Amino acid sequence: MKKILIVEDHSDIRRLIRLTLEFEDYEIREAADGPTALRIAAELQPDLVLLDVMMPGPLDGLDVCRHLKSGDFPVTPRILMLSARCHAGDRTAGMEAGADMYLVKPFSPLQLIDCIADLCALAGEQ
């Protein structure tokens, strides 16, 4: 069973993502901020992190991404950055932080499912 961590400060968006993924065989956990995301990631060791870029608090999504990709975690997850920021520079910043894919909000449930499938295929896991 794939483990997915949803990191998003807006509860409505977290709920939409969870509802989109509910019908698949995933273990899903959620976090509303960067520090909580890192704590959960350390215990869950997710296969995939759906990570909002703009979050309140000391760590934004780019910071969390860098931490998750730093090699300090037993499992390095695939990261799908989710952002309302759609400029090329924003996408570049996400990819340079270590994101595997970048999806611009608003996105459809089908777009999200397709991105997750693509990330699993990249990892050789379908």
Image (tube, helix red, strand yellow):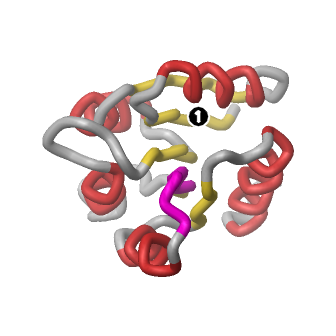
Query: What's the magenta region?
Result: 80-86
Using the image, determine if residue 55 lies above or below residue 92: above
Residue 125 in view (yes/no): yes
Which kind of residue does numbered mark 1 sit on? Lys
Local crowd size for mark 1, using a 10 Å CA cut-off: few (<14), some (14–19), many (≥20):
some
Comparing 75 with 57, the one in front is 57
Comparing 22 with 27, the one in front is 22
Using the image, determine if residue 81 lies above or below residue 36: below
Badge 1 is on which residue? Answer: 3
| Residue at the spot 40% in from the left edge and 52% down from the top edge | 53
Percent position of residue 90, x then y: 43, 71
| Residue at the spot 72% in from the left edge and 51% down from the top edge | 116
Judge whether residue 24 is colored magenta. no
| Residue at the spot 40% in from the left edge and 30% down from the top edge | 9
Is residue 57 toward the left or the right of residue 25 in the image?
Answer: left
| Residue at the spot 85% in from the left edge and 44% down from the top edge | 110
